[in-house]
Amino acid sequence: MTKKSVPTIALWNPFWIMVWSFIFSPVLGSILIRANCSEMGKELQAESSSYWTVTGMVLLIAYLFAEPWLPASALSDFYFWFLWLGFYFIWLFASALPHYRLVNGTFGSNYYHRLWGKPLMLGAAGLLLWMAVSLTYIIGLLAAGILDPNTINLQ
């Protein structure tokens, strides 16, 4: 009878990091990957994940402030989705999948699976904050007369 080894490390499941990052943001996923890599002692991968976090934040903030000034076209309703999906898939193949392979190759499923309550609540809070800042920014531009209300597509 073989004895299964006792897990000695607690990680967030890398598969679910990819899934939740599609819903919330690769920023959340890169923060969790950084935590996993730090826990595993992989400091180079943790540092790389920090760059993904910063890149994602810069992209989201840049889009937030640039969006009212983007040209109107038939595709203008999809600018954000193109940016979001493009960044997600680049992050997925460059960071998340290698992390998935690293965890599965090193531990398989023999690790303590960390609970998702706190990261999911923080991810939802981040999305709400982003929407609140976006709405406040647009209302401020309208109130200051910088943005013409007739040019906004409210459909």
Image: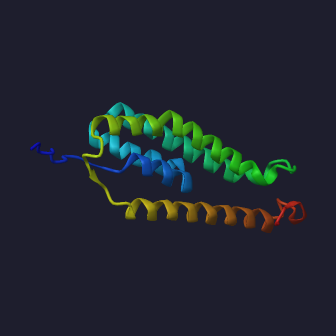
Q: Nearer the viewer, residue 60 or 124?
A: 124
Residue 128 drawn at (x, y percent):
57, 65
* Farthest residue, direction front: 1
Residue 142 drawn at (x, y percent):
80, 65
The residue lying at 68 percent from left, 66 percent from top is 136
Is residue 82 depicted above or below 130 in this figure? above
Locate the N terminus and report the quarter of the image it occupies: top left
Is residue 78 depicted above or below 2 in this figure? below
Residue 107 drawn at (x, y percent):
27, 40
Dividing the picture into quarters, in which one does residue 139 lie?
bottom right
Q: Nearer the viewer, residue 58 or 49?
A: 49
Dividing the picture into quarters, in which one does residue 23 lie?
bottom right
Locate the C terminus and report the quarter of the image it occupies: bottom right
The residue lying at 63 percent from left, 63 percent from top is 131
The residue lying at 35 percent from left, 35 percent from top is 102
The residue lying at 45 percent from left, 61 percent from top is 120
* Farthest residue, direction left: 1
Q: Is residue 54 left or right of residue 35?
A: right
Q: Is residue 142 left or right of residue 39?
A: right
